[in-house]
Image (tube, rainbow, N blue to C red):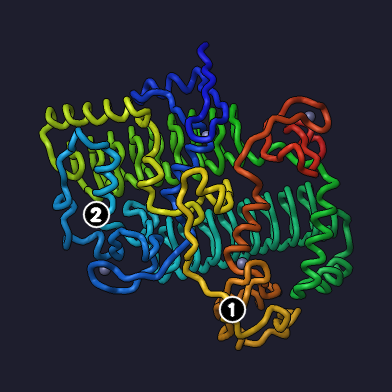
Amino acid sequence: MRIESKQCQNCHSQFTIEPDDFSFYEKMGVPAPVICPECRFKRRALFRNETTLYSRKCGLCGKFVVSSYNPKSPYTIYCEKCWESDAWDPYSFGKDYDPSRPFFEQFGELFKKVPLKSTMISTSSKLGPNVNSEYTNYAGGNKDCYFIFNGGGNENLMYSRGVSMSRDTLDSYFGINLERCYEAVNVDQSSGIQFGQNVVSSLDSIFTLNVSGLNNCFGCVNLRHKSYHFMNEPLSKEEYERRVNDVRGSYSKMQESNKKFQEFSLKFPRRENNNLKTVGSIGDYLFESKNLNHCFETTRCEDSKYLFSVKFAKDSYDVLGFGYDSELLLETVAAGYSSRIIGAFWAENSQNIEYSASMRASQNCFGCEGLKNAKFCILNKKYGEDEYKKIRAQIVEELKRTNQYGLMFPPVIAPFAYNETVAQDNLPLTKEEAVAQGYRWEDDLQMTKGKETLKPEAIPDHIKDVLESITNEVLACISCSRNYRITPAELQFYRRMILPVPRKCFFCRHQDRLHRRGPMKIYDRTCANCKKPIKTSYGPDRPEIIFCEACYQKEVI
Ligand SMILES: [Zn+2]
Ligand SMILES: [Zn+2]
Ligand SMILES: [Zn+2]
Ligand SMILES: [Zn+2]
């Protein structure tokens, strides 16, 4: 059994390559990486900007579009319709590989020239196109949605990430089959959940954590199949309603209840992870999966390592997003329905693609961008099979010699700044730290500050006192002072759900939800009850009581 300890060439921390890793890398034909898993995630994540959107012009038809590419960036951006059309020819950008210059320098030049699609909408999404849902990214099959990221098949959904097959829901992170939910984090098959986390099959409950089968409960932790419980105590329906109605709709009372609930929840043990129906795996938010190692937010995957936000993939390493019937992915962002892909920023229905972007239905391409139904292409130029193999071998040899084969593109090629991407969401850095680690930082995000027409303290405390005219006002976030608005559909939702108007902007609310989800890290600890070793995303300095699976199951009622 060969285990190799290495020092990361980027951050100089120690990391190990395990026997299973060696067999995977051998299968992929790449050497073991010289960069640690965390630095590799950061590099890869520089290719995934989900939530930082800009308004800019389509480079072909001139129409204003929502785009994830900063207007200041050097790329040509086309709207979805122009990009998918035959009005431009990706092969016209084709170039010969020049062995006297670094390959990535040459790919970087191509990447700046070939038009990019304004936002990332999968072409093979089985959920169909988005309808009336312009402010969405990495999303498909959404209707009447607004600010939806990495989610599909939704209707009337707003301000959410990682939510699918849901409706009439706002401000949620990671969930499926939700209806009338608000501030739900990892909630499944539930309706009317407000401020709920790790909730399954529940109804009309507020402030709940690690519960299932509840209805009409408030401030409850670790309960199963209960109704009319208030802070884990049973009440008569009348008394329950009296207490809950006293709080609902009032911003100050909901804030106070939230604080009390957070303190109350610390008295109860928590499970070492949030995995369900998953075996032989290390990570968090893993569902119906097996043999995963250091994976997060992953559903129905197997025999893989370092996956984040992936579904239906197997035998893959270092994957960010998508998946779907794929295998042998290595260092990919948004690769799906594909096999043997190394270093890709969006690949679909493709095989044997290396160091390429926006590839569809293609095979055996290296260093290409924006091609469809392509074969044996290098730097967007077509070759015969033998010539292709010869040049590919030359480039692979160069990348192996410079310790880059099997890693993601170098950060200098990345289209996004660190703070525009999911890197900042999951491994946050300050500007100084990001720059010191070699990543770009964007100071000029499209936003306004100081344009507010209604100060936070002038917003009525209770939703019943909020006037329709609030939808014409410009508000200011109490946390970052960024301006934001309340849309008419949103106000209607708050009124119907008896919820106060939020005092923070979407971006701060999203950060709060990420904080509730927990970090994308795994710590070695011991169960607070039986002292058995556990692996958990709760760091050793956290105040929560963490139990192993077996001890936790004995605890819940
Ligand atoms: Zn490192
Ligand atoms: Zn256009
Ligand atoms: Zn804010
Ligand atoms: Zn235990």
- Asked whether the viewer can see residue 325, the reply is no
- Residue 56: image location, x then y, percent: 36, 70
- Residue drawn where x is 24% and y is 54% of the image: 114
Instruction: Give the number of callouts.
Output: 2
- The amino acid type, in three-letter code, at marker 1 is Gly
Left-right relation of 65 to 534: left
- Asked whether the viewer can see residue 52, the reply is yes
507 versus 529 height, above or below = below
Of residues 66 and 413, the one nearer the viewer is: 413
Q: Is the C terminus in the top left, top right, bottom left or bottom right quadrant?
A: top right
- Residue 255: image location, x then y, percent: 77, 67
Residue 106: name its quadrant.
top left
Q: Secondary structure at mark 1?
A: loop
- The amino acid type, in three-letter code, at marker 2 is Val
Q: Are marks 2 and 1 in contact (CB under 8 Å)?
A: no
Assess mark 1: CB under 8 A from ligand 3?
no
Q: Which mark is residue 66?
A: none
318 versus 73 height, above or below = above
Q: Which mark is residue 450?
A: 1
- Residue drawn where x is 64% and y is 84% of the image: 454
- Residue 428: image location, x then y, percent: 58, 49
- Residue drawn where x is 36% and y is 40% of the image: 409
Label 2 to label 1, Cα distance in Å?
Answer: 38 Å
